[in-house]
């Protein structure tokens, strides 16, 4: 056998051995190592809890004011942004025509009243028939109604503030002619404000457990302003949220105004059913929803379970609403990367006498 043929056979044998070795490696099944996790027990929450939502201060009433009579505006006595008190004259219609009509009616009223009173007195003395008496009474009632109508019209040439508040808008200028009922000014009520928030259905169904309400203005952090619940809408909007309206009395020391942003806190009655407390490290998100991994001690596997976050605690705990029973073990560390039904291994607890694992 020559040297060339020997070399070919040699390399062929070596290549065959390598191919067999590689095929054997591929054929060998991979070893799956269970992921290490740490677990904690779910605890029932019996204390009070609260939730906070963003809100905005708005005027309790934004009223548009109009004259009850028509005519040219003589003058405005208040400007936009000015604070006015109940009863202040805000604007006036030129009273010329109304004053003339009132004075003419007043003279007629005086004459008819005196004549009617004489006929009524004679009737009581049985000196005139009942027909004259009825005419006198009717004439007196007619002229009295006309007199008071013209007096009211003259008084209505002055537009007065119905409550304490601020002038918000002015829709006309002096000397312009306005019709009856046409808005001239708008005012916002300064007696109290409203605060509106939107809550999800998870809090809507618990509205009977609402206990206390307060808000904190962004410009006055740390100052709790009490709120009074007005109403909760019974139908969700297109975002599946329910509108909640509160009344807020203005604080004398706080310069609050409509349009300011606030944080509204709702506190619930203690002992609410379905609330649990778990480590915040056990939570993970999937498709904008919160979940935890429930550990099956018999199968040593994990199962995904949805939860609704109610309140975050400062000590690393979170209050959730779920169907988890007290004592259920959930994964509290190593939640990332797990999948449904995956086998896991529990992380061995550190001995209190072996701090730092030195022994």
Image (cartoon, rainbow, N blue to C red):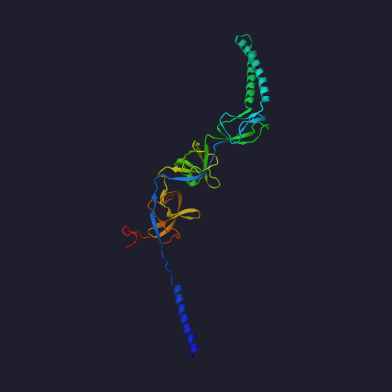
Q: Is residue 241 left or right of residue 45?
A: right
**Residue sitting at the far left:** 353
Residue placed most toward the observer, 162 or 330: 162
Eyeballing the image, is 213 above or below 119? below
Residue placed most toward the observer, 302 or 185: 185
**Residue 281 in view of the camera:** yes
Q: Is residue 249 left or right of residue 92?
A: left
Spot occupied by residue 344 in the image (x, y as percentages of width and height): 40, 61
Number of residue marks: 0
Q: Is residue 322 left or right of residue 100?
A: left
Q: Residue at x 48, y 87 (%)?
A: 6
Eyeballing the image, is 154 above or below 168? above
Eyeballing the image, is 306 above or below 212? below
Image quarter of the C terminus: bottom left
Name the quadrant containing residue 187: top right
Spot occupied by residue 283 in the image (x, y as percentages of width and height): 44, 54
Q: Residue at x 49, y 88 (%)?
A: 5
Spot occupied by residue 38 in the image (x, y as percentages of width and height): 39, 58
**Residue 131 in view of the camera:** no
Q: Is residue 18 left or right of residue 112?
A: left
Q: Residue at x 46, y 76 (%)?
A: 22
Spot occupied by residue 175 in the image (x, y as percentages of width and height): 68, 31
């Amino acid at each position: 056998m020559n040297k060339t043929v020997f070399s070919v056979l040699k390399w062929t044998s070596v290549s065959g051995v390598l191919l067999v070795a590689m095929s054997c490696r591929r054929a060998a099944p991979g070893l799956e190592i269970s992921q290490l996790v740490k677990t904690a027990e779910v605890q029932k929450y019996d204390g009070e809890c609260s939730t906070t939502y963003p809100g905005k201060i708005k005027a309790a009433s934004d009223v548009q004011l109009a004259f009850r009579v028509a005519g040219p505006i003589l003058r405005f006595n208040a400007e936009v942004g000015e604070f006015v008190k109940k009863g202040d004259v805000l604007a006036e219609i030129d009273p010329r025509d109304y004053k003339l009509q009132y004075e003419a009616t007043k003279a007629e009223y005086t004459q008819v009243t005196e004549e009617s009173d004489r006929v009524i007195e004679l009737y009581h003395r049985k000196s005139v028939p009942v027909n004259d008496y009825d005419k006198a009474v009717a004439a007196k009632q007619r002229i009295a109604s006309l007199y008071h109508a013209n007096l009211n019209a003259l008084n209505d040439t002055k537009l007065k503030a119905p409550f304490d508040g601020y002038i918000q808008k002015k829709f006309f200028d002096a000397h312009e002619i306005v019709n009856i009922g046409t808005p001239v000014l708008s005012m916002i009520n300064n007696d109290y404000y409203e605060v509106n928030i939107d809550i999800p259905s998870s809090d809507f169904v618990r509205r009977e457990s609402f206990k206390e309400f307060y808000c904190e203005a962004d410009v006055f952090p740390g100052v709790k302003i009490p709120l009074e619940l007005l109403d909760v809408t019974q139908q969700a909007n297109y975002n599946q949220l329910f509108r909640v309206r509160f009344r807020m009395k203005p604080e004398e020391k706080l310069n609050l105004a409509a349009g300011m942003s606030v944080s509204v806190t709702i506190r619930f009655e203690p002992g609410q059913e379905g609330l649990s407390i778990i480590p915040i490290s056990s939570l993970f998100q999937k498709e904008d929803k919160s979940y935890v991994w429930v550990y099956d001690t018999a199968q040593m596997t994990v199962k995904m379970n949805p939860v609704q976050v109610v309140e975050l605690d400062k000590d690393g705990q979170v209050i959730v609403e779920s169907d988890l029973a007290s004592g259920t073990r959930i994964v509290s560390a190593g939640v990332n990367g797990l999948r449904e039904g995956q086998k896991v291994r529990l992380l061995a607890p550190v001995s209190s006498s072996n701090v730092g694992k030195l022994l």
